[in-house]
Amino acid sequence: MKSKSLRFKLTDIILIILMILPVTAGIVLKVLTKPVSEGIEISGARIFFSIDMPVQPLFITESQVNSLIVLLSVFFLSLYLTHGITAKGGSKRQVFAEMIVEKTENLVNGNMGEYFQGFAPFVAAIMALSAFSSLLTLVGLYPPTSDINIVAGWALLVFILITHYKMKCGPIYYLRSFTQPVPFLTQLNVISEISTPVSMAFRHYGNILSGSVISILVASGLQGLSNMIFKNLPGVLGKIPFLQIGIPAVLSVYFDLFSGCLQAFIFAMLTMLYVSTAFPAQDYAKKHKLVKNN
């Protein structure tokens, strides 16, 4: 029993280390590779190296590396939360894990219906990936959600799902839907279809990026204002940026913590809304009923 308990605790420690290790490696990589700069610096994801490909080079950027960091950390966090789960339950960790599953399933059932019960893991993965990607700014790493390429990839995946469920009644039904309610609206319906992943990508990307830019500009402005007001103080006191104490942290709580989690929730809600409304449930049921009768 003691041996089992020791093994259990050792596994927990290993999982916690594996959770933290990717983020630590990302911080070390940034410190070792980021060039020294002065003043305000607002730039996109840095390119580490490129791989020659037939059409064009494949660039390995900070966004891709940090996305991998988030994936690994979330993966080991999931293993940690599910380690030691039993039928009886009782541990706080298991209660927390079950609460996440229950809340996600209720969210999916309430917004998508019972037909989409299997979407709960996908929705939970989207929220976790998006939220933790935005929260990387809290440890000084570049958030992948500030890169349009990353968020556009997520939106494209959602668009594929939307199209898949729209075609449940067949490709003819899908093409005919563009002519509804009247044929002369076909062009507008096509534009609306294409604009779905574009709007999802730019909404998420724009909110996260704008928050990061505003935080940097305000922090830099407060530093300059502090130097102007307190520069005549004697000794070291004149060099301390007093106005930078506290205010940037409050902004970080909103833009990095609250806004990042909110945008993750909005992206997941839009995913559920677009996929569920795209599915022609009544026509699909009629089609299958006819098939069964035949």
Image (tube, rainbow, N blue to C red):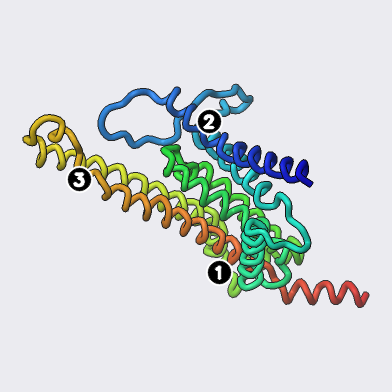
Residue 154's disc is none
In which image quadrant can residue 194 be found? bottom right
- What residue is rendered at 60% in x and 46% in y? 74
Expressed as whole percent of the image width and height from the top left, the position of residue 11 reads 69, 41
Q: Nearer the viewer, mark 2 or mark 1?
A: 2
Quadrant of the snapshot with the C terminus: bottom right
User: Which amino acid, by three-letter code, is at mark 1?
Assistant: Phe
**Mark 2 or 1, nearer chain start:** 2
The residue tagged 3 is: 243
Q: Nearer the viewer, mark 3 or mark 1?
A: 3
- What residue is rendered at 62% in x and 25% in y? 53
Could you tell whether 255 is left or right of 23 in the image? left
Give the Cα distance between marks 2 and 1. 56 Å
Could you tell whether 227 is left or right of 6 in the image? left
User: Which amino acid, by three-letter code, is at mark 2?
Assistant: Ala
Q: Residue furthest front?
A: 2
Give the Cα distance between marks 2 and 3. 32 Å
User: Which amino acid, by three-letter code, is at mark 3?
Assistant: Leu
- What residue is rendered at 66% in x and 43% in y? 12
Expressed as whole percent of the image width and height from the top left, the position of residue 162 reads 64, 59
Residue 184's disc is 1
In which image quadrant can residue 67 be found? top right
Category of crowding for the residue at label 1, using alpha-carbon neighbours closer than 10 angstroms: few (below 14), some (14–19), many (at least 20):
few
Q: Residue furthest left?
A: 232
Give the Cα distance between marks 3 and 1. 60 Å
